[in-house]
Amino acid sequence: MVSKEAYSDLDNLMYRKLKAWAKHRHPKKSGGWVSKKYWQTIGGNNWVFATSHEGKNPMRLRSHAQTPIVRYVKVKGEASPYDGNLIYWSTRMGKHPEMTKRMATLLKSQKGKCSHCGLYFREEDVLEIDHITPRILGGKDEYKNLQILHKHCHDEKTTEDGSVVKYT
């Protein structure tokens, strides 16, 4: 069963339970009266269990179908957040307690690859954050102008792009 069907089934079950509760609470009233009292049409959605229209935003019960569906990727092999593989977990989650938020976010956006050589980062690699357009040449310190490179790739790029200032 997929999430959408499960949520729909839960919404149907919730409706039946609420309908039974409302009929039990008002045994002498008709079904139409009970429905008018507890269910409304809000924003094009019919049969929304909500408080009466006192004010612009009545309190209402959210449906299960409004829950965002989040897909998860399986963890590779025997990997564990405690095994010390910062590269894998930062690339996977975009965060890791032992890595800066900036580095982890960039790792995730680059899918664990060096922008210069295209190779995957390994656990033993030395990583550096680089400005795509160097700051000395007018580049800004923003995520869209940042990338992670191997240390040796960063050294190569820096000499190629002319951002090294030589003092004589």
Image (cartoon, rainbow, N blue to C red):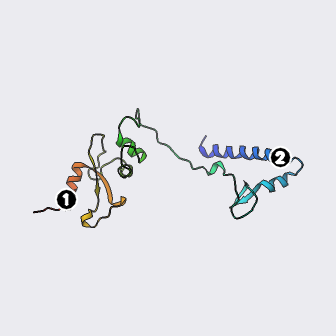
Against 166, residue 78 (above or below) is: above
Against 135, residue 94 (above or below) is: above
Q: Which residue is mark 1?
A: 160
Q: Type of residue at label 1?
A: Glu
The x, y position of residue 23, in whole percent, is 83, 47
Q: Is residue 55 left or right of residue 84?
A: right
At numbered mark 1, what does the secondary structure look like: helix, strand or loop?
A: helix
The x, y position of residue 167, in whole percent, is 13, 62
The N terminus appears in which quarter of the rendering? Answer: top right
Q: CA distance from mark 1 to mark 2?
A: 78 Å
At numbered mark 2, what does the secondary structure look like: helix, strand or loop?
A: helix
Q: Residue at x 72, y 64 (%)?
A: 55
Residue at the extreme top of the image, as rendered: 78
User: Crowdedness of circle 2 by 10 Å Cα count: few (<14), some, many (20+)?
Assistant: few
The C terminus appears in which quarter of the rendering? Answer: bottom left
Q: Residue at x 20, y 53 (%)?
A: 155
Q: Which mark is residue 135?
A: none
Q: Residue at x 68, y 44 (%)?
A: 10
The x, y position of residue 109, in whole percent, is 38, 52
Residue at the extreme left of the image, as rendered: 168
Q: Type of residue at label 2?
A: Arg
Q: How many marks?
A: 2
Front tag of 1 and 2: 2
Q: Which mark is residue 25?
A: 2
Q: Residue at x 40, y 32 (%)?
A: 78
Residue 47: quarter of image: bottom right
